[in-house]
Amino acid sequence: MLLMGWLVAAYSARNLRGQRRQGRYAVLLATAISALWLMVVAEPLVLMALGWTVSGLAIAGLVAHSNTAAARSASRRVAGRLLVGDVALWTAVALLLSAGVSGRAGLEGVGWVVPALLAVAGVVRSALLPAWRWLPLTAEAPSPVSALLHAGVVNGMGLLAILLWPVFAAAPGVLLVLVAVGGVTAVAGTAAMRVRPDVKGKLASSTSAQMGYMTLQVGLGLPAFAMLHLVGHGFYKAWLFLRAGGASRRPAVPALAGIPAWALLALPAATALVVALGAVTWPGWPVVDLVPLVVAAAAATFALAALLWPDRRTAAHSTARGRAWASIVVLAGLFGYVLLLGVWTRIFPEEGVWSATAAIALTLTVLLSGAAGMYAVARGWLRPLVRPVVIDSAHRVRGRVQPVVAQPSPDTEVAVEVAARTV
């Protein structure tokens, strides 16, 4: 968290040079970073909640940095939406304090009301359905603020699950709701990303989709996977925002060609082999633990397909070098994701939330539903459903729908397109 804050601060010093209200910006940025750090490391629940609320208010203040009417309006709306989740969090903390629990120890057996309230707070902070409309409003913020927001603040659902996992583990009903909310948001966010006309809007929709997938992992009882996802997504999305607008377009070159289609089969097969070896090396994995591995294999397949056979729009604004580097990043990230699973899961308790039968049923349901949802996205069936919401958000941000404002570098544009296909 501190490393990401340092990178954003260093970038801001150059990116905002010569602009007005830099002192206000520096104070709010330092406040947001300090509050996020406090939320993560604080043992008392009150201090954790205080860091949660202060970080959200500081980010809302940074949205108004340009001091335009649109930025001030967006800042007020973002603050109002985030405070709804804050009320739920503080109510949960008050209930825990009334039960004699003041820290992260002794969180077991607190009932279902507290985890339900924490889930509401996480849903709002992570811009999940039905509370996802505040995130596109943050497009008024400078790019460094967007990087910090999407890399740290918006990860609220995952952070709460990691910090207070015993509370969620004792409430399977709440976890089931999170599975549904996360799955629907992942599909809807992917569909919205394909409709948004602007770069920041696409990245915001991509973040909602990624937060949906992370929430799905939490609902499946996999906090270690959610933590790994949180870290990887944070650095990746921060890089995209800091790169947006950083270079002009370059002439396109023909797409990569000459690679047979059967070569795509090698990647999921190799991933399946790693999974099989992992099952032998790390015995005792619950069946549901394999879901992220299966998704990683599918994501690698679709990512490679998108990179090798881009559509006309992607091919017109990308370079072979950009697609090659994007493919290396995607494949290296997925390979590291698979290899780190055995080490990362040792951080958390080994007790599973679901029985073997429930895990198998839940896994099949998630896989089949996710496949159906992504097929609907690919066919464009969800466009009529998400377009009114996307257009309405664009009107709220700028007062009218605008074309792409920032001209991203070719590598960034390829990464955005790949994210749309692999989220």
Image (spheres, rainbow, N blue to C red):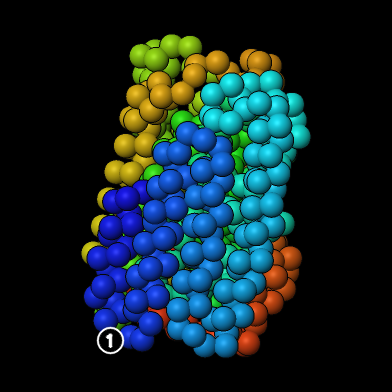
**Which residue is at 36% across, 14% downward?**
281
Q: Secondary structure at mark 1?
A: loop
Based on the displayed image, in which of its 4 quarters is residue 341 positioned? top left
**Which residue is at 38% across, 28% downward?**
344
Give how far across and how far down residue 416 sits, in percent.
43, 64
> Vertically, is 310 above or below 49?
below
Q: Amino acid at mark 1?
A: Gly
Give how far across and how far down residue 242 sits, in percent.
33, 67
| Left or right: residue 62 compared with residue 92 | left
Based on the displayed image, in which of its 4 quarters is residue 280 positioned? top left
Give how far across and how far down residue 292 sits, in percent.
50, 34
Q: Is residue 225 visible?
A: yes
> Vertically, is 140 above or below 155?
below
Could you say which is closer to the camera, residue 99 or residue 66? Answer: 99
Could you say which is closer to the camera, residue 271 or residue 61? Answer: 61
Could you say which is closer to the camera, residue 18 or residue 337? Answer: 18
Residue position for label 1: 18
Number of labels in the image equals: 1
Q: Is residue 128 visible?
A: no
